[in-house]
Amino acid sequence: MLVIEELYHTYVSTDSEQTLPALANINLTVADGEFLCLIGPSGSGKSTLLNIMAGFITPTQGTIKLDNRRVNQPSPERGVVFQDHNLFPWLTVLENVAFGLHCQGVPRQRAYRIAQEMLTLVDLADYSFFHPHQLSGGMKQRVALARVLVLDPLVLLMDEPFNAVDPQTRRKLQDQLLTLWKQHRKTIIFVTHNVDEAIYLADRVAIFGAQPGHIKTEMQITLPRPRQSTTASFQRLKTYLLQLMEQNIPPDLPNLTSHH
Amino acid sequence: MTVTLAYLSVPYRVSTMPNGGTIILRSALFLLIFWIITAFAAQTLHGIPLPTPGQTFLRGIELFSGSLFLQHSIYTHLGYSLYRWALGSLIAVLIGSILGFVATSHIKAERIILPLSAFFQPVPSLAWIPLAILLLGLGTRSTIFIIFLAGVFPIIINVVAGIKSVPSSLLRAAAMLGASPQIIFWKVLVPGALPHTLSGLRTSLANSWRALIAAEMVGGTDLGLGYAILQCRWSLDYPSAFVAIFIIALIGLIIERGVFRKIELRTIKVWGMGNQGGDQCWS
C-alpha cells in the first residue's frame, strides 16, 4: 500500500529569489493492485507528484510510504515509464530490458533470457537486437514498460506514457497495459490529461486542480470492464469529469447505470 | 498556360554525386598539374630547383626501400614521430578525461578548469617551447610536453560538453533501474558523452600531430619527420622534404578514415545519435 500524507512541494529558483508552490496538502492512499489515474490540467502538479513518488524529487514537506517504508530515493521497486521513453540509445532493445537485471547482479545469460521472455510478453520478441531509434514511438514505450516489469516492481509509475503515439496505437497500448495489469496485478499510478484514457483504464481517478496543485476530488470508476468508450454511460462520465476539471463546484453526478 | 508550363518542362540536369574514388582522383590530378606548373615556373623564372613530382616519387621509392636519410631510415624517423605523438596524446587523453570528469562532478572545479582551458586553448603549442625547454631541457621530454599541451585542452572541453549532453532524464532512468555510481559512469555517462568525446579526440590528435612536427623542428632532437624536413635545407635534399610532407598528410588521412570514421560507424551511427560537431580537423 502506498500512502501519501500532508505532502507539500515548492519549487525554488536557483538564485532562491522566487518560489513556486507546486503541490499543497496532498493526501492519497493507493491500494495494492489498484489502477489509479491522476488527471488534471497542465500545471496542476500531477507529474511533480509522480516524480516525488519515484524518488526523483524530495518534497518540501510531508511523507510518502510504500508498505510502511519511507520513499526517499529512486528504486526498482517503483518502476517509472516516462513520457519520453528514456531508453538508452547505445543499448539494443534486449540490453535495455536487461539493464536493471544487470544492476542487480543477475548473470548476463540469465538476464538476457528473462529480458527476452518479457519482450515476448509485450510482442517485441523479434526486435531484441534493434536499437531504440529504429523503433516506432509505441514500440519504444513497450520496451520502456518491459524494462521496468522485468524488475517485478511493487508499483508502476507512468507519466503520460502514451502521449507521443497516434490514437489507434494508443488504444492498443492501453489494452496491452490492462492485460499485463490483470496478469501481474501491479499497483499502477498513471498520469494523464486525457479524460477518455483515465476512464478507460482506471479503478479510480484523482482529479487535480492548479495554483497550487491539489487534489480536488477522487472518484471510483465502476464501469464494468472491458470498457467501451462509445457507450452512453462512458460518455456521460466523461462529460461529468470534464466539468469537474473545469469547475470548482462539483456538478451533479450523472446516472451511470442506465444503458441505451 | 503554355508559357507557365514551359518553364516547368525545361529539362534540368540532375547533378550526380561523384563517388569517393573519382573525387580523390580528380583532386590528385589537379594537385599534380598545379605542382608541375609551379615547379616549371620556379625553375625557369627564378632558377629555383623545386622538386618535380617525378623527382619526389623516385626519392620516395629510395627512402621507402630503406636508403638512409640523415643517418637513419625514413621508417626510424616516422617511428620516432609516431612514438612521441602516441605517448604525448595518451597522456593528454588520460589527464584531459580525468580533468573533464572532475569538472563535471564538482562545480568549484569546473569554475577553475573550464575558463583556464578556454583561455589556453588558442595558444599555439610552439609558444610553449621556451617554457618546455626551461622545465625539461632539450630533447624528447620537451617534445612530449608540447604534444601534451597541444592535445589536452580540446579533450577537457569536449569531455565536459559530452557529459553535460547526457540528458538528466537518462540519469534518472538509470537510478530508477537501480544502477550504482559505477554502472552510471560506465554504461550511461561514457557512451552518452562519446559523440562529443570523439570530436574532442579528433581535434586533439590533429592539433598534437601538427605540434609534434613543429616541435621536432626546434626541440633539439636528431630524429623524427619534423627534424628531417628542417634538415633538408642544409643538405638541399628538397625531394625528401616533400616525401616527408606526404607522409605527414597520409598519417592524418589514415587516422581519420581508418580510425575515427570506423569508430563512428560502429557506435554513434548504430545508436542513431547523429554526428555532433564531428568536424574534419585534418586540414
Image (cartoon, coloured by chain):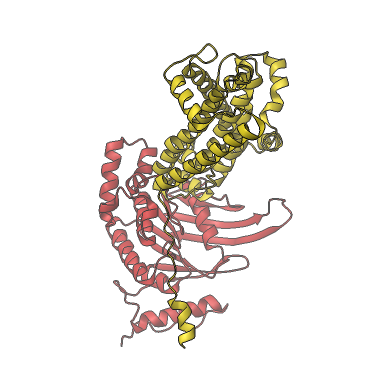
Q: Is residue B139 left or right of residue B266?
A: right
The quadrant in which the N terminus of chain A is found is bottom left
Q: Is residue B283 visible?
A: no
Query: Residue A105 occupies which quadrant of the picture?
Result: top left
Task: Please give the letter of the chain rendered in yellow.
Answer: B
In the image, A260 versus B96, the foreground residue is B96
Q: Is residue A17 left or right of residue B198?
A: right
Q: Is residue B91 left or right of residue B64?
A: right
Q: How many marks?
A: 0
Where residue B13 sits: x, y (%)? 44, 66
In the image, B144 versus B245, the foreground residue is B245
Query: What hue does chain A carry in this figure?
Result: red
Q: Residue at x 47, y 41 (%)?
A: B28
Which residue is situated farthest in the front direction here? B44
The quadrant in which the C terminus of chain A is found is bottom left
Q: Is residue B105 left or right of residue B61?
A: right
Q: Is residue A43 visible?
A: yes
The relative height of residue B233 versus residue A38 in the rendered view (above or below) is above
Where residue A236 sits: x, y (%)? 41, 83
Query: Residue B238 occupies which quadrant of the picture?
Result: top right
The relative height of residue A12 versus residue B95 in the rendered view (above or below) is below
Where residue B22 sits: x, y (%)? 41, 47
Q: Residue at x 68, y 13 (%)?
A: B137
In the image, B10 versus A244, the foreground residue is B10
Where residue B87 sits: x, y (%)? 53, 22
Which residue is situated farthest in the top direction here? B71
In the image, B265 versus B246, the foreground residue is B246
Q: Residue at x 56, y 51 (%)?
A: A57
Q: Residue at x 46, y 81 (%)?
A: B6
